[in-house]
Amino acid sequence: MSETARPQAVPTKLIDNERTIVTEWRFAEGAETGWHRHEFDYVVLPMDDGVLQLESTDGTHHAELKKGQPYYKQTGVEHNVINASGKEFSFIEVEYR
């Protein structure tokens, strides 16, 4: 867990139906999602280039994201996502029920 308070990332649900949840996540510089566990398979689509710091039970690492290049993860991922880009950053998350 983080030792100092960080600003919170802002989620905006764009679609929420029986099959799919689509959320836009906006991060101020240094903002975090807070610890969470993914209950569904999901795809993330970065809206800009950026760097995310990922805190998990396996430790902390960084991921470089490129605008328009999606990635996929399966149910069960547990982590805290922090914007380490040095600027505002956003992505679209698509979850499959």
Image: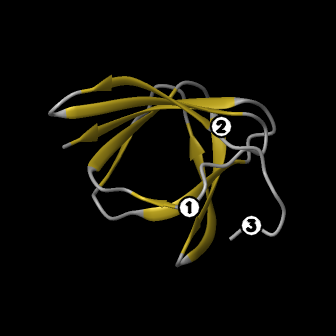
Q: Position of residue 8 (x, y in %)?
A: 69, 43
Furthest toward the bottom, the residue is 58
Relative to residue 8, is residue 74 drawn left or right?
Answer: left
Q: Residue 10 sits in which quadrant?
A: top right
Question: Residue 35, labelled with which disc?
Answer: 1
The amino acid marked with disc number 2 is Gly
Look at mark 2 in the image and give the residue it sits on.
50
Dot 1: element: loop
Q: Earlier in the sequence, mark 3 or mark 2?
A: 3
Q: Badges 3 and 2: C-beta atoms under 8 Å apart?
A: no
The quarter of the picture where the N terminus appears is: bottom right
Q: Nearer the viewer, residue 72 or 34?
A: 34
Q: Position of residue 59 (x, y in %)?
A: 60, 76
Dot 3: element: loop
The amino acid marked with disc number 3 is Ser
Count of numbered labels shown in the rendering: 3
Q: Residue at x 73, y 30 (%)?
A: 88
Look at mark 3 in the image and give the residue it sits on.
2
The amino acid marked with disc number 1 is Trp
